[in-house]
Amino acid sequence: MKLSHVKNSSSLQIRNSNSQGDPNISARKNEIIRCTELLLEAIGSGDFESFTRLCDSSLTSFDPEALGNLVEGLEYHKFYFDNILGKNEDFRTTNINIINPLVHLLGEDSAAIAYIRLTQCVDKTFLPKTTSKILWYI
């Protein structure tokens, strides 16, 4: 499956291996991938309201900026939404690829997704910037 969306000069693509088996399981896994896509779109556009709708208020993360420390809650992330995300004109074009998403259904209302997030952007000096990571639980 390959999805492309253009929003504020950025696009999002998902590359996924073919799903086999129960169509209900495939639909649930695709829903998790779609939620991940929506989350990345919210981050890329600096839409904190959508981000908070998609995340639990007590979410935890190990972000590079936290220097290996576990951070909890939305306030940590709000700083980046308020000051950086969606506001950095140096990165006019960004391309986000979700590569090889692997969804594990843990129960009726929980799942885990692991994938490579490849973020490509070119700054005003035309130097490429690239990052990748991600594993999260729903």
Image: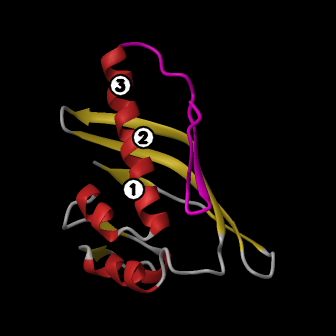
- Which residue carries the number 2 mark? 33
Query: Dot 2, crowdedness within 10 Å: few (<14), some or many (≥20)?
Result: many
Query: Dot 1, crowdedness within 10 Å: few (<14), some or many (≥20)?
Result: some
Residue at figure coordinates x 47%, y 66% from the top left: 45
Residue 49 left/right relative to 44: left
- Which residue carries the number 3 mark? 27
- Which residue carries the number 1 mark? 39
Quadrant in the picture for the N terminus: top right
Residue at figure coordinates x 40%, y 51% from the top left: 38
Residue 104 left/right relative to 95: left
Residue at figure coordinates x 26%, y 74% from the top left: 74
Picture coordinates of residue 81, whole percent (x, y) = 39, 78
Mark 3 and mark 2: Cα distance apart in space: 10 Å
Residue at figure coordinates x 80%, y 82% from the top left: 125
First in residue order: circle 3 vs circle 2:
3
Amino acid at the residue labelled 3: Ala
Mark 1 and mark 3: Cα distance apart in space: 18 Å
Query: Dot 3, crowdedness within 10 Å: few (<14), some or many (≥20)?
Result: few
Residue 94 left/right relative to 126: left
Element assignment for label 3: helix
Element assignment for label 2: helix
Highlighted magenta segment, given as a residue range:
1-22
